[in-house]
Amino acid sequence: MENIKLTNASNTGDSYSAISTTTTDLELNNVVIENCYGDVGSAIKCRDGIYKFNNVVLSDNLGGKAIRISCLTYSTNPILQINMENVLISNNYPGQGIGAGSGGGANIRGHHEIAGDYYLKMINCDFNSNHNNFYDGSTGLGGSSGLFLSNDLTADIVNCTFADNTLSYNTGCVITAMGADINIYNSILFDNDGYSFIIWNEEEVNISHSLIENGDSNVFYYSTGAINWMEGNLDEDPLWLNSGEYPYYLQSTSPCIDAGTLELPPGIELPEYDIAGNPRIYGETIDMGAYEWQGVEAEEDEIIPITQTKISNYPNPFNPSTTIKLDLAESGKIELVIYNIKGQKVKTLMDAYSTKGHFEIIWRGVDDNKRSVASGNYYIKLKVNGKERTVSKCVLLK
């Protein structure tokens, strides 16, 4: 389904008002769903399937979560694979009356009894200004305004923005993890009501190179779970533009510029553009959040064009890490990979679309499984749009 706009749909009962599927795969491209109403939810309801959403807008809907995706309760072979890129979920509110839905962004869950490979990949998504009014009287906890993830789900959340989401009960949160393992990279959670996270059990939650308001002090641990705070995280004002068509675009002084990482989980390939349609990587490396800062025009500074694509690294020899300088004379799909002297791939440092420019990437002497590699000679190979451009040798000495 592509290039359509669905508005003013209304439904009651256990279904969503705009799109509902069961055991059927669904792909949405350039789709807008707005001003719809549903008791259980408001925009999309899917059960058991493979789902791809690209350039989708879900806004100003009333009812339950804007998206609810789960496994069928009675399924004997449940499947759930979800890929969301450049999705805007904004201004989705509860319905009116008893049982009319508690609002918020998305509810995604695997099967409550059958373990499986239930997976969510979310890149360049913006959750803003959603509201949730759920309250659990038995625990005293509120609902989630952004994401509720549960039931053996694994989620990779990359370059997403969660902002200005509100709650009727401040004992709620932005993201709930209930039996779900979550990896968060290059993302921003700021200026939301309630906790940033509610961690229910012994979920594995890893956060890297992300801005999380108030850090671990704004996390509620219901049981024995914990968050693994990895490298590069921030706790400060992201300095959004706060005006215009893209209010969560970064100001030129934002600490989130060039503060992300390209060392992402296996299988994550960044799209060519951010959610606003701008190049996903600009400057030395990727920014935090769904919106990539695109620079400012300099009237007086002379810009020296890059005429040759090349790579170098310093220090060399190195231990334990080296910085790889990358000069790109052309834009396109960039693959930067470390190989050993046997020609075996050791570490993928970059696999993403990029504009031309100067970049710096750190290799910490580990492979794709984060294991330290042995001393010796290694080769840094650069491909642009599938064609090999240059190779450079580096030496690890321990």
Image (cartoon, rainbow, N blue to C red):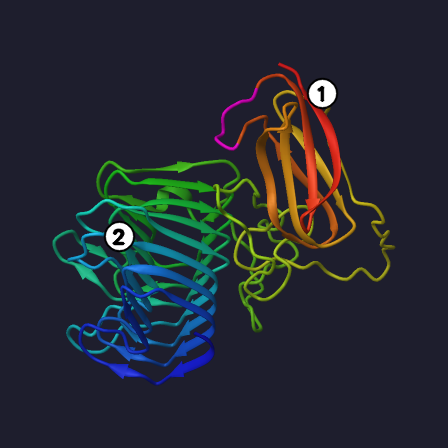
Taking 314 as reference, is 292 left or right? Answer: left
Q: Residue furthest left?
A: 138
Q: Position of residue 70 (x, y in %)?
A: 26, 59
Identify which residue, 73 or 104, lies in the foreground.
Answer: 73
The reply to whether residue 87 is visible in this rendering is yes
Which residue is at 36% across, 81% downward? 35
Q: Secondary structure at mark 1?
A: loop
Identify which residue, 261 or 265, lies in the foreground.
Answer: 265
Q: Which residue bears the numbered disc 2?
A: 110
The numbered dot on residue 95 is none
Q: Secondary structure at mark 2?
A: loop
Q: Name the magenta segment's main secondary structure.
A: loop
Taking 15 as reference, is 206 left or right? Answer: right
Q: Position of residue 130 (x, y in %)?
A: 37, 67
Say which quarter of the image contains residue 183.
Answer: top left
Which residue is at 17% across, 76% downward? 13
Q: Nearer the viewer, mark 2 or mark 1?
A: 2
Q: Is residue 371 magenta?
A: yes
Q: Which residues are magenta?
A: 368-373
**In the figure, 59 relative to 336: above or below?**
below
Taking 114 as reference, is 371 left or right? Answer: right
Q: Amino acid at mark 1?
A: Pro
Say which quarter of the image contains residue 6.
Answer: bottom left
Which residue is at 29% across, 79% downward? 37
Quarter of the image with the C terminus in it? top right
Q: Position of residue 361 (x, y in %)?
A: 65, 38
Q: Which residue bears the numbered disc 1?
A: 317
The reply to whether residue 314 is visible in this rendering is no
Q: Position of residue 71 (x, y in %)?
A: 24, 57
Q: Is residue 172 magenta?
A: no
**In the figure, 338 relative to 51: above or below?**
above
Which residue is at 67% across, 59% downward? 294
